[in-house]
Amino acid sequence: MISALASTLIYIHGFHSSPQSKKATETIAYLHDNRPDINLLVPELPDYPMHAVTMLEQIISRCEGRVGLIGSSLGGFFATYLAEKFDIKAVLVNPSVEPHISISEYMGKNINPYTQHVYYLTHDHIEHFSRLQVNTFKHPENLWLMVQRGDEVLDYRKAVAKYDQSTQLIEPGGDHGFKHFDAKLPEIIRFLGL
């Protein structure tokens, strides 16, 4: 039984991903086996950015104890916005820093490979990413950037430059999925203070 004031960890998946992603399921398994006292939430995000952020804001607003975030890829972009808004800690795993640019190539019809949801991205949706962009950090100490140089989807150097005032882990090799992510979970939980 989770108490009302239990610590809550929210895992925020990335673009064209879901709670069934590898890092999400590794997080679920780790907490089940090692930290069942933490209330873990892995929401399936709506495909549109403002809908996703609104859902996450509502979830955080309902939490009564300490809250920490893990955001992967586009989830790292959302986690950055939420960490600043709510003054909470977040771990950003190979985060997207310019989704208004990187996701613009997906305008039009899309199908989420995990959920099979069909949706259509418009110029308005891309503009929503720009509105959620955090350019100045009030609490850079709340963020831990984790990147691998072998990320084949996003340029890790952009994240390193953006989060230059925050704690950083920069690993050689790896990939966008962040190899051996599960081994980092004990440190992640410590950083989040959960």
Image (cartoon, rainbow, N blue to C red):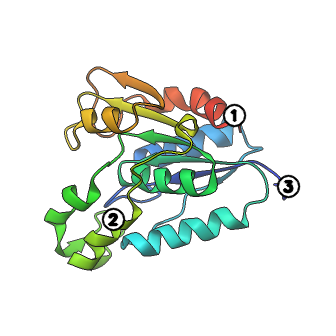
Camera-near label (1 vs 3) is 3
**134 or 47: nearer the viewer:** 134
- Residue 39's x, y, as percent? 71, 52
Position of 86 with respect to 182 (left or right) is right
- Residue 170's x, y, as percent? 36, 24
- Reply above or below: 53 against 193: below
- Residue 38's x, y, as percent? 73, 46
Q: Amino acid at mark 1?
A: Asn
- Residue 36's x, y, as percent? 74, 43
Q: Residues within 10 Å of mark 3 (few under 14, many from 20)?
A: few
Q: Is residue 163 visible?
A: yes
Secondary structure type for disc 1? helix
Q: First in sequence: mark 2 or mark 1?
A: 1
Marks 2/1 in contact by CB < 8 Å: the verdict is no
Name the residue tied to disc 2. Answer: 129
Q: Which label sits on residue 3? A: 3
Marks 2/3 in contact by CB < 8 Å: the verdict is no
For image coordinates 47% across by 48% down, the residue present is 71
Secondary structure type for disc 2? helix
Name the residue tied to disc 1. Answer: 34
Q: Which label sits on residue 54? A: none
Position of 79 with respect to 142 (left or right) is left
